[in-house]
C-alpha cells in the first residue's frame, strides 16, 4: 500500500493511494497541471490513475477534477447530482473497484452530499475522513481498527476564536456541520485505533487557525504508540506499508 498526500488544507486537497496496483486519487482540489507535476515527482504517470473519489463539491476538493478526468478518462465516483457525464458514477455505500472494496459513509458538513471513504484490500486498509463536524457511532463501528487513518485535524479552538473571521463563520466551523478541532480529532482517533493501526496522517489543517506543531502535540498527548505524520499545505512524504 502506498499513500501520498499531494495537497492538504483550505487551498486544495488531493491524496494518492495505491492498493494492489489499483491507483486512486481522493479529491482534486488543485489544478490539473499541479496534480500532474506532483504525480510525476513520485514516478506516477497521471494516465495510470484508475479511480477518482470525491468527498464533496467544495472548490478546494474539485478545482482540477474536470480537466484531469477529461484528459485521463479516470472513472470518477461523486455523489453530486449535477454530474451526469458518463464518466461520473454515483457513489453507493459499498463497491468493488478492481479488487479493492471501497466503502463510502456520510460525513457531517455544511453541504448535503459529503462523504468519507474506507479502502480495503486483504489486510490493507485506509480511512479517509475530512470535512466533518462529528463522527457518529455507526460510522465509528465501520472504520475501527484500520491500518492507516487520514483524518482532519483542522483547527485549534483558541486560535480560531482569535482570528478576524466573522462570528458566524467561527460558529459554523465549530458546529456539528463544520470541521474537527485538534482535540476532537484526537478524541475520535483514540477510540478508533487498534492493534492493526500502523500510521496516522493529520490532514486539512487550517493555515490561519492551526499549526502542524500544535496538531501533532495534541495528538501525541492522546496516542503515543503509533507514528503520526502531519500533512501540510504541500502534502507529506510517500508512505509505503
Image: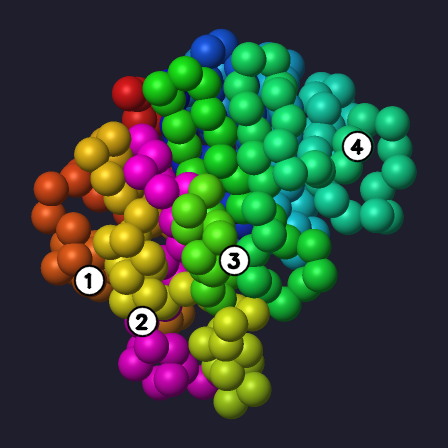
Element type at mark 1: helix
If the image is split into quadrants, where does the C terminus sit?
top left
Which one is earlier in the sequence, the residue at label 4 or at label 3?
4
Residue to which mark 2 is pinned:
156
Residue to which mark 4 is pinned:
88
The residue that appears at 75% across and 20% down in the rendered structure is 73
Q: How many marks?
A: 4
Assess whether residue 150 is covered by the magenta stretch: yes
Q: Is residue 151 left or right of residue 88?
A: left
- The reply to whether the C-beta atoms of the residues labelled 2 and 3 are less than 8 Å apart is no
The residue that appears at 70% across and 22% down in the rendered structure is 74
Q: Position of residue 49 (x, y in %)?
A: 60, 19
- The reply to whether the C-beta atoms of the residues labelled 2 and 1 are less than 8 Å apart is yes
Q: Is residue 143 left or right of residue 37?
A: left
Range drawn in magenta: 143-166
Mark 1, Cα crowd under 10 Å, few <14 / some 14-19 / many 20+, is some
Q: From the viewer's perspective, is the residue at label 2 or at label 3 nearer? A: 3
The residue that appears at 45% across and 18% down in the rendered structure is 121
Element type at mark 3: loop
Q: Position of residue 3 (x, y in %)?
A: 39, 27
Q: CA distance from mark 4 to mark 3?
A: 22 Å
Residue to which mark 3 is pinned:
131
In the image, residue 211 sits, relative to residue 33, either above or below, namely below
Q: Position of residue 28 (x, y in %)?
A: 61, 39
If the image is split into quadrants, where does the N terminus sit?
top left
Which one is earlier in the sequence, the residue at label 4 or at label 2?
4
Q: CA distance from mark 2 to mark 1?
A: 9 Å
Numbered badge on residue 218: 1
Near-viewer residue (202 or 164): 202
Amino acid at each position: 500500500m502506498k499513500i501520498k498526500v499531494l495537497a492538504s488544507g483550505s487551498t486544495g486537497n488531493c491524496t494518492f493511494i495505491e492498493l494492489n496496483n489499483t491507483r486512486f486519487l481522493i479529491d482534486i482540489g488543485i489544478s490539473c497541471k499541479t496534480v500532474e507535476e506532483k504525480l510525476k515527482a513520485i514516478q506516477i504517470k497521471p494516465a495510470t490513475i484508475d479511480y477518482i473519489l470525491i468527498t464533496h463539491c467544495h472548490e478546494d476538493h474539485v478545482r482540477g477534477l474536470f480537466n484531469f478526468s477529461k484528459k485521463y478518462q479516470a472513472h470518477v465516483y461523486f455523489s453530486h447530482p449535477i454530474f451526469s457525464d458518463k464518466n461520473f458514477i454515483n457513489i453507493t455505500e459499498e463497491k468493488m473497484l478492481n479488487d479493492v472494496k471501497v466503502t463510502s459513509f456520510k460525513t457531517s458538513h455544511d453541504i448535503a452530499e459529503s462523504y468519507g471513504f474506507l479502502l480495503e484490500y486483504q489486510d490493507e486498509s485506509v480511512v479517509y475522513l475530512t470535512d466533518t463536524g462529528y463522527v457518529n457511532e455507526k460510522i465509528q463501528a465501520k472504520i475501527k481498527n484500520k491500518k492507516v487513518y487520514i483524518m482532519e485535524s483542522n483547527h485549534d479552538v483558541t486560535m480560531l476564536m482569535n482570528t478576524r473571521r466573522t462570528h458566524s463563520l467561527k460558529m459554523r466551523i465549530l458546529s456539528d456541520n463544520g470541521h474537527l478541532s485538534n482535540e476532537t480529532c484526537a478524541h475520535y482517533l483514540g477510540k478508533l485505533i487498534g492493534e492493526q493501526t500502523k500510521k496516522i496522517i493529520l490532514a486539512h489543517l487550517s493555515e490561519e487557525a492551526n499549526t502542524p506543531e500544535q496538531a501533532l502535540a495534541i495528538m501525541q498527548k492522546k496516542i503515543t504508540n503509533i507514528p503520526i505524520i502531519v500533512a501540510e499545505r504541500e502534502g507529506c512524504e510517500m508512505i509505503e506499508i
